[in-house]
């Protein structure tokens, strides 16, 4: 299951609720796969080592990005699971659309999500957030994510 949509829209909250409803599920947050604020363009390729093995029924893995150190840190193994929830901007990429059983799109008003971002990350992060919002908007148009969603929240 892919839970996609703009930053600050509530994807993480929804993914946590899905995890609570399905014991044994695994949630992977795409924030851990992004190469910093400018990493959205390559996140779909970074999903290959995770999703392609899992699709064959064997463990996958992803390289976790350390936002403090500004570099990738270690590989995180993910065993086969009855439910994998990919949560984050780019989780519903076209590259892996055939592997996605359900694509959920989560959205709220831009002003609310920016306010949430400032509350969480601090006002000093506003320039990063504003650029990210432009980047994700272009990504979603390119990927036609919302139109392909099975569920819109």
Image (spheres, rainbow, N blue to C red):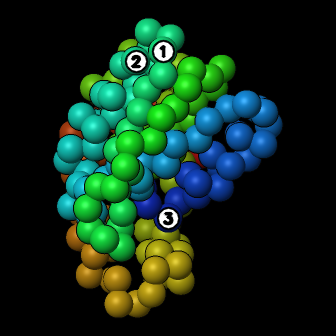
Q: Which residue is mark 1?
A: 58
Instruction: Identify whether 98 is placed above or below 43.
Output: above
14 horizontally vs 37: left or right: right
Indicate which disc residue 134 carries: none
- Disc 2 and disc 3: Cα gap in Å? 30 Å
Dot 1 lies on which element? loop
Reply above or below: 81 against 139: above
Taking depth in this image into account, of 81 and 92 the one nearest to the observer is 81
How crowded is the residue under tag 3: few (<14 C-alpha within 10 Å), some, or many (20+)? many
Q: Dot 1: within a 10 Å radius of its alpha carbon, few (fewer than 14), some, or many (20 or more) residues?
A: some
On the image, the x and y values in percent for residue 55 come to 44, 14
Q: Nearer the viewer, residue 87 or 130?
A: 87
Q: Nearer the viewer, residue 130 or 48?
A: 48
State how far apart marks 3 and 1 are (Cα). Answer: 33 Å
Residue 1 picture quarter: top right
Disc 1 to disc 2: CB gap under 8 Å = yes
Query: In the image shown, does 139 or 33 lie closer to the viewer?
Result: 33
Query: Which mark is on residue 53?
Result: 2
Provide the residue designation for mark 3: 8
- Mark earlier in primary sequence (2, 3): 3
**Mark 3 or 1, nearer chain start:** 3
Q: Residue lying farthest top?
A: 56
Q: Residue furthest bottom?
A: 124
| Image coordinates for residue 42, horizontal then vertical, percent | 21, 44
Is residue 152 at least partly visible in the picture? no
Q: Earlier in the sequence, mark 1 or mark 2?
A: 2
Foreground mark, 3 or 1, reads 1
Disc 1 to disc 2, how far (Cα)? 5 Å
Q: Is residue 53 left or right of residue 120?
A: left
Residue drawn at x 48%, y 15% as measured from the top left? 58
């Amino acid at each position: 299951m892919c839970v996609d949509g703009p930053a600050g829209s509530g994807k993480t909250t929804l993914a946590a609720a899905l995890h609570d409803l399905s014991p044994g599920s695994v949630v992977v947050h795409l924030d851990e796969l992004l190469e910093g604020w400018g990493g959205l363009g390559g996140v779909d390729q970074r999903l290959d080592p995770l999703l392609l093995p899992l699709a064959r029924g064997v463990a996958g893995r992803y390289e976790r990005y350390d936002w403090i150190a500004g570099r990738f840190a270690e590989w995180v193994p993910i065993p086969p699971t009855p439910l994998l929830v990919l949560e984050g901007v780019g989780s519903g990429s076209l590259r892996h659309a055939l592997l996605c059983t359900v694509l959920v799109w989560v959205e709220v008003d831009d002003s609310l999500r920016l306010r949430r971002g400032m509350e969480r990350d601090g006002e000093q992060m506003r320039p990063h957030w504003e650029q990210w919002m432009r980047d994700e908007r272009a990504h979603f148009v390119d990927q036609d994510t919302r139109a392909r969603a099975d569920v819109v929240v």
